[in-house]
Image (spheres, rainbow, N blue to C red):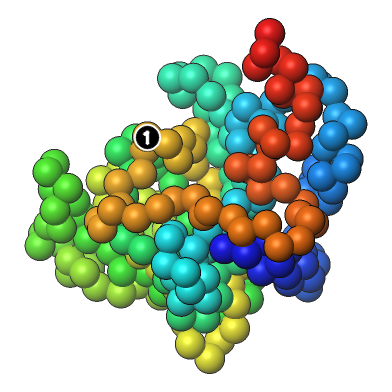
């Protein structure tokens, strides 16, 4: 993805979140120049991979297959004590697909916080990672609901779904309803090990630097955060 496109998507996301009265934390607005001057006290942001995360899943067409996320908080370790949770906010556009995947360990609640309607197609996964044709029983705002394998579920603003591990899901915003502001509350998030995409694809984009970053993506921290570099070099 081009940096100019990423910068534009960040500007639009900030405006969209403001429209729905969702306020991002201060570090969302730091510039690369700000990051250069930050000390070791900011290491938790980097270690837990908090912040902007924009991906086209390697598609080259962000509006068709892509997702904008901001990780607000995230834990670490074995998830048994302490900071064992994660929270994200996402902007899902009309007919913009987040491709089919499940998580090995993470249970996640996907919550429509505002905007349009979210569509989600869901299957159970077999232990071998195939799509099961058995029915899917899930908890939807505290109420159990069962649908056929591969059925499309629809969520209005305020509604949510709880997705346990080994449940395949792909989602997009319903056409004609506008972009959707989506929250995620989950166990600790580990994008390196816990995602199983149905088709192999890239989780993080390669970035073509055609302008200066407006704000950093999580993948940009090693380049701009010199306190992190000092730490890495011991
Ligand atoms: Fe997921």
Left or right placement of residue 23 versus residue 124 in this view: right
Q: Secondary structure at mark 1?
A: loop
Residue 46 lies, in percent from the top left, at 67, 31
Q: Quadrant of the C terminus?
A: top right
As drawn, the residue found furthest toward the top would be 234
**Residue at horizontal 40 percent and vertical 53 percent from the top:** 202
Q: x and y percent of residue 193 in the render?
A: 37, 34
Tell me, yes or no, if residue 192 can be seen here: yes
Q: Residue at x 46, y 23 (%)?
A: 79
Residue 7 position, x and y percent, is 73, 63
Look at the image and tell me whether residue 144 can be seen. no
- Check disc 1: other Cα within 10 Å, few if <14, some if 14-19, many if 20+: few
- Left or right: residue 37 compared with residue 25: right
Q: Nearer the viewer, residue 190 or 218?
A: 218
In this view of the protein, which residue sits in the foreground, 174 or 30?
A: 30
Q: Residue at x 66, y 42 (%)?
A: 220
User: Where does label 1 land, which residue?
Assistant: 193
């Amino acid at each position: 993805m081009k940096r100019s496109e990423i910068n534009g998507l960040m500007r639009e996301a900030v405006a969209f979140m403001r429209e729905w009265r969702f306020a991002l934390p201060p570090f969302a607005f730091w510039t690369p120049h700000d990051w250069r001057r930050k000390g070791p006290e900011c290491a938790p942001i980097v270690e837990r991979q908090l912040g902007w995360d924009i991906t086209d899943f390697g598609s080259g067409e962000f509006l068709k297959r892509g997702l904008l996320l901001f990780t607000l908080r995230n834990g670490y370790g074995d998830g048994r004590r302490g900071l064992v949770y994660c929270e994200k906010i996402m902007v899902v556009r009309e007919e913009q697909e987040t491709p089919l995947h499940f998580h090995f360990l993470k249970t996640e609640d996907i919550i429509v916080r505002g905007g349009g309607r979210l569509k989600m197609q869901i299957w159970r996964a077999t232990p071998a990672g195939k799509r099961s044709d058995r029915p899917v029983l899930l908890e939807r705002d505290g109420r159990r609901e069962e649908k056929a394998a591969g059925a499309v579920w629809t969520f209005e603003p305020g509604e949510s779904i709880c997705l346990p591990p080994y449940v395949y899901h792909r989602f997009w915003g319903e056409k004609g309803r506008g972009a959707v502001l989506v929250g995620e509350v989950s166990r600790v998030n580990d994008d390196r090990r816990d995602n199983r995409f149905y088709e192999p694809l890239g989780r993080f984009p390669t970035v073509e630097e055609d302008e200066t970053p407006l704000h950093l993506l999580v993948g940009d921290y090693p380049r701009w955060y010199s306190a992190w570099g000092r730490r890495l070099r011991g």
